[in-house]
Image (tube, coloured by chain):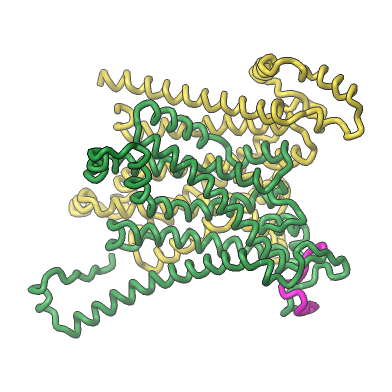
Chain colours: A yellow, B green
């Protein structure tokens, strides 16, 4: 026991350090792309601007200072929550991005819960009778699900609903009805992938002796599966689900938000690109990097909790 | 549970069942094999067909994919009302021939996907070999690097890079390739670690083969099958990734063609002109689905542990 109380903090410390390294790398990348390789002045001023005007702007932005000084200022400002001014909305970029965050979080949370629940149910159903009709149906559907790009599925849903279903909005934000189609479009891919892993890990577990033993003791199939099998099959499922959550947050939500005009961070990023609003693009990338690191950290915690060998090894 | 036919294990056992029953069983088993292989063959043929039309696009395309004709805009496919055989799959919002853009789109999408996989595999093999064969601090550094890259929001990095620089095909390939090497590296590292201590590698070392020679002659051929399986799976993923970027306007630019770009440009017309979006969408789904099937078939076919078990799907 004594070693466990020491090993866990060390493990946490190592993962926390890793998270910090990732965020620093994200900051460096954003700085490099926007300040060193790309020239903001070139992008901000019209083509006919004179060389003096350009130089004046460089001076006022501090772009003539040594790179390290600029980097120090960039990091210092960022630490105080100052990610620059949005030139398109004439407001602080951090403010612009943060007010879009709730919509994205709502969509991702909704889509992720749907995929996780659907995948656990479908994957287990398929695994209980491998080779049956239900299994074939579920396996085929999940294979198709992982092969459709989400924006195409989104557009097909729009087409289907616009023609056939009255009262289900195909764009916008506000009521639960608005959430239905974006959730379906974003959830399809991860549902398919998690279903596949649930199916294969439950099949693996079902062949183990303890299942036979539990059944022989008279435990019902439902009880055996929910109490023992799913718990033991959890590690690969948690790993993959975490990956899927990260993928949703880190980019798969962008095309879905674009199709449904969902006012989240992804739609903002696309608009900012069109407006050449680099402060906002920067802020989006940093915010998403922080969210991804947080999710990864939580997954590591779950993982350590589920598998003592990682915690103590 | 489905009943499992016992395999005839010895001639002694064989005599218990009569010849006709044995033949029936063998036929049944052969039938099962062919049925599962049939899907794989269909998938292989579909992938091959897509590659073929991609290569032959300039020869078989009926029109110049960039040629606009406003008088002919949004013509439906030949078989529906108002369509004619000069534009078999109809025309888009600028009057360009959908079939020709689809063929050239295959060329572009597949070229980018193949090239990015090549970049990812090359970096992945080198990194994984070094990591797995040398071990020690090299291993720690490379694995930490892979971890950092893996925690980066892929699509968003692509968005920031492709928004600062003009999106060129080579930049898209670089972004997608660099974003994908970690999976290959992890897989190669795992395999190399297992192979490092085998007799044949020991033997090669004993006769004086250097590390580079061992990696090339002993290790690489032995990981080829696993590498190919993973590469096909990555090909499918990268076709979707490219389609997302192009759909969002950050990838391939008009007048060039790509499946994602066609959908992105046609999405405003979806309710009146479904064919502009549906055909490239179906092309993506069909290609990605076949590649996924080929990859899972390769996995079962090359893994001796899976070959005789229940077919993985």
The answer to whether residue A299 of the structure is visible from this angle is: yes
Quadrant (top left/top right/bottom left/bottom right) for the C terminus of chain A: top left
- Between A231 and A256, the one lying in front of the other is A256
Give the answer, above or below, for where A252 lies relative to A44.
below
Instruction: Classify residue A2 as left or right of residue B90.
Output: left
Q: Residue at x 48, y 46 (%)?
A: B121
Highlighted range, magenta: B81-94
Question: Which quadrant holds residue A103?
Answer: top right
- Between A74 and B132, the one lying in front of the other is B132
The answer to whether residue A94 of the structure is visible from this angle is: no
Give the answer, above or below, for where B294 lies relative to A66.
below
Question: Which quadrant holds residue A148?
Answer: bottom right
Where in the figure is residue A53, as x and y percent of width and height? 89, 23
Instruction: Classify residue B197 as left or right of residue B260.
Output: left
Give the answer, above or below, for where A43 lies relative to A72.
below
Where in the figure is residue B167, as x and y percent of width and height? 71, 44
Instruction: Classify residue A268 as left or right of residue A229.
Output: right
Q: Residue at x 42, y 50 (%)?
A: B227
């Amino acid at each position: 026991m004594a070693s466990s109380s020491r090993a866990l903090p060390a493990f946490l410390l190592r993962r926390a350090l890793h998270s910090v390294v990732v965020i620093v790398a994200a900051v460096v990348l954003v700085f490099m792309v926007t300040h060193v390789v790309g020239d903001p002045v070139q992008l901000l001023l019209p083509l006919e601007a004179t060389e003096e005007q350009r130089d004046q702007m460089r001076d006022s932005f501090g772009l003539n200072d040594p790179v390290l000084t600029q980097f120090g200022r960039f990091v210092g400002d960022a630490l105080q929550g100052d990610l620059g001014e949005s030139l398109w909305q004439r407001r602080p970029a951090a403010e612009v991005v943060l007010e879009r965050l709730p919509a994205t979080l709502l969509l991702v949370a909704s889509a992720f819960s749907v995929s996780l629940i659907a995948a656990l149910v479908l994957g287990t159903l398929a695994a209980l009778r491998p080779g049956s009709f239900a299994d074939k149906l579920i396996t085929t559907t999940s294979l198709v699900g992982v092969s459709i790009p989400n924006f195409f599925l989104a557009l097909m849903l729009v087409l289907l609903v616009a023609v056939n279903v009255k009262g289900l909005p195909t764009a916008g934000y506000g009521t639960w009805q608005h959430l239905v189609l974006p959730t379906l479009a974003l959830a399809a891919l991860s549902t398919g992938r998690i279903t596949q892993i649930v199916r294969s890990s439950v099949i693996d577990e079902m062949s183990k002796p303890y299942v036979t033993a539990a059944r022989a003791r008279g435990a019902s199939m439902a009880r055996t599966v929910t109490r023992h099998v799913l718990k033991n099959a959890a590690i690969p499922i948690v790993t993959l689900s975490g990956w899927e959550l990260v993928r949703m947050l880190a980019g798969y939500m962008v095309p879905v938000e674009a199709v449904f005009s969902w006012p989240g961070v992804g739609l903002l990023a696309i608009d900012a690109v069109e407006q050449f609003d680099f402060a906002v693009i920067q802020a989006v990338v940093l915010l998403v990097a922080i969210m991804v690191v947080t999710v990864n950290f939580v997954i590591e915690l779950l993982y350590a909790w589920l598998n003592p060998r990682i915690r103590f090894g | 549970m489905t009943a499992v036919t016992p395999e005839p294990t010895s001639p002694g056992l064989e005599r218990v069942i009569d010849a006709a029953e044995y033949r029936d069983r063998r036929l049944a088993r052969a039938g099962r094999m062919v049925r599962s292989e049939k899907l794989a063959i269909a998938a292989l043929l579909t992938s091959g067909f897509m590659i073929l039309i991609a290569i032959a696009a300039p020869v078989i395309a009926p029109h110049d994919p960039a040629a606009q004709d406003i008088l002919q805009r949004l013509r439906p496919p030949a078989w529906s009302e108002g369509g004619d055989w000069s534009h078999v799959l109809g025309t888009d919002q600028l009057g360009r021939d959908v079939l020709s853009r689809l063929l050239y789109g295959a060329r572009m999408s597949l070229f980018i996907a193949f090239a990015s996989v090549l970049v990812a595999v090359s970096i992945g093999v080198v990194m994984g070999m070094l990591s797995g064969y040398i071990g020690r601090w090299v291993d720690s550094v490379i694995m930490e690097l892979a971890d950092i890259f893996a925690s980066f929001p892929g699509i968003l990095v692509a968005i920031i890079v492709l928004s600062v620089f003009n999106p060129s095909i080579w930049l898209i390939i670089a972004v997608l390739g660099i974003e994908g090497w970690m999976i290959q590296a992890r897989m190669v590292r795992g395999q190399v670690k297992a192979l490092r201590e085998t007799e044949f590698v020991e033997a090669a070392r004993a006769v004086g083969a250097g590390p580079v020679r061992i990696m090339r002659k002993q290790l690489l051929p032995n990981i080829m099958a696993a590498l190919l399986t993973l590469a096909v799976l990555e090909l499918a993923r990268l076709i979707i990734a490219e389609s997302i970027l192009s759909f969002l306007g950050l990838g391939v630019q008009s007048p060039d063609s790509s499946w994602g770009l066609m959908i992105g440009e046609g999405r405003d017309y979806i309710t009146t002109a479904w064919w502009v979006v549906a055909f490239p969408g179906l092309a993506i789904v069909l290609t990605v689905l076949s590649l996924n099937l080929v990859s899972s078939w390769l996995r079962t076919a090359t893994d001796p542990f899976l070959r005789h078990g229940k077919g993985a799907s």
